[in-house]
Amino acid sequence: MPEARVIPIREPVAPQPFVADDEYVAEPPEWERRLAGALAFARRRITGDYPIDDFGFDPDLTDHVFMAALRPLYEKWFRVEARGLSNVPDTGGALIVANHSGTVPLDAIGVALPLLDQHPAHRHLRMLGADLVFRLPVVAPLARKAGHTLACNADAERLLSSGELVGVWPEGFKGIGKPFSERYKLQRFGRGGFVSAALRTGVPIIPVSIVGAEEIYPMVGSLKTLARLLGVPYVPVTPTFPLLGPLGLVPLPSKWLIEFGEPIHTEQFGPGAADDPMLVFNLTDQVREVIQQTLYRLLMQRRSVFF
């Protein structure tokens, strides 16, 4: 009788989860990702699980509502091209100083969006605004939630000391409200308060030049009587407004170039340097001259206003 064959008994192997090949792993569709993001945002707003700083800045609302709504205007309509973002530090405070133009201050958001979307650190820009901005009933609370504050040295120094990017437009209403015939000619930069804030906190000053915003609402005149009645610096007259009514409020689709210049370092001067009026004046003039010369160079480089 043949000898029985012994077959070893193997221990049972736990079933392994199925892993598909890379070529079969499908990314969730765009609409699904958007829906998931919207539901997560709604949950945070309902539960109150979102941060707000001492200035009222709500980064969650800014990123998912304000910037999301404005992004198509700058990406598709103005086709903003940002250069020199590497000159903006990844961490720590810095003062962004830019020219102001365009009748309506849309250029401020044009500077903020590349810093948030294209900069490696995705940094928020905390803007310093005029008194009028924070007196308007609807605009004021929205500006606070977007992280902006009054253009005063105390707030600027507090933000810079805490490591924030702070944006200032020293020309103010003189810049955005100048006639089209004076486009790209910088107005006076005030008394250099922004330079004093940078000196006291030892942060770099980043000169920024914006080409393209001058053409969105070519200002050919102002309704001065109406402006006085409304308590605003000017009521613009453009080739399309008020002639075309609400349609005249649509900005022209000019092509924007924004260049972030090399930083002007201030830490070597020390905080006491802010009390030296001659140094403040010289640095203010240096920043203004850098921006003006860069504007001329960018104007020479662009092919046309709209392309």
Image (cartoon, rainbow, N blue to C red):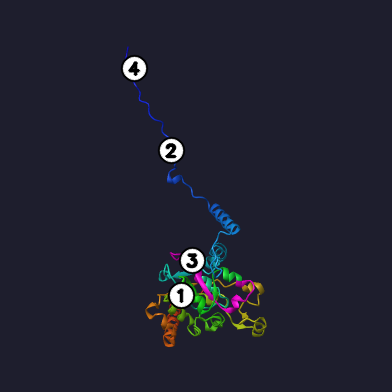
Residue that appears at 53% across and 51% down: 29
What amino acid is found at the position of numbered circle 1 in the picture?
A: Leu
What is the distance, in whole Å, between disc 1 and disc 2 at their CAs? Answer: 56 Å
Position of the N terminus, as image quadrant, is: top left
Mark 4 surroundings within 10 Å by alpha-carbon count, few (fewer than 14), some (14 through 19), many (20 or more): few
Q: Position of residue 168 (x, y in %)?
A: 50, 77
**Amino acid type for the residue under numbered disc 4:** Ala
Query: Mark 3 or mark 2, which has the lower sequence index?
Result: 2
Closest to the observer, 257 or 140: 140
Which residue lies under the disc numbered 1?
95
Secondary-structure class at tag 1: strand
Between the residue at mark 1 and the residue at mark 4, the CA separation in whole angstroms equals: 89 Å
Q: CA distance from mark 3 to mark 2?
A: 43 Å
**What is the span of residues highlighted in magenta in the rendered image?**
111-140
Q: Earlier in the sequence, mark 1 or mark 4?
A: 4
Q: Which mark is residue 4?
A: 4
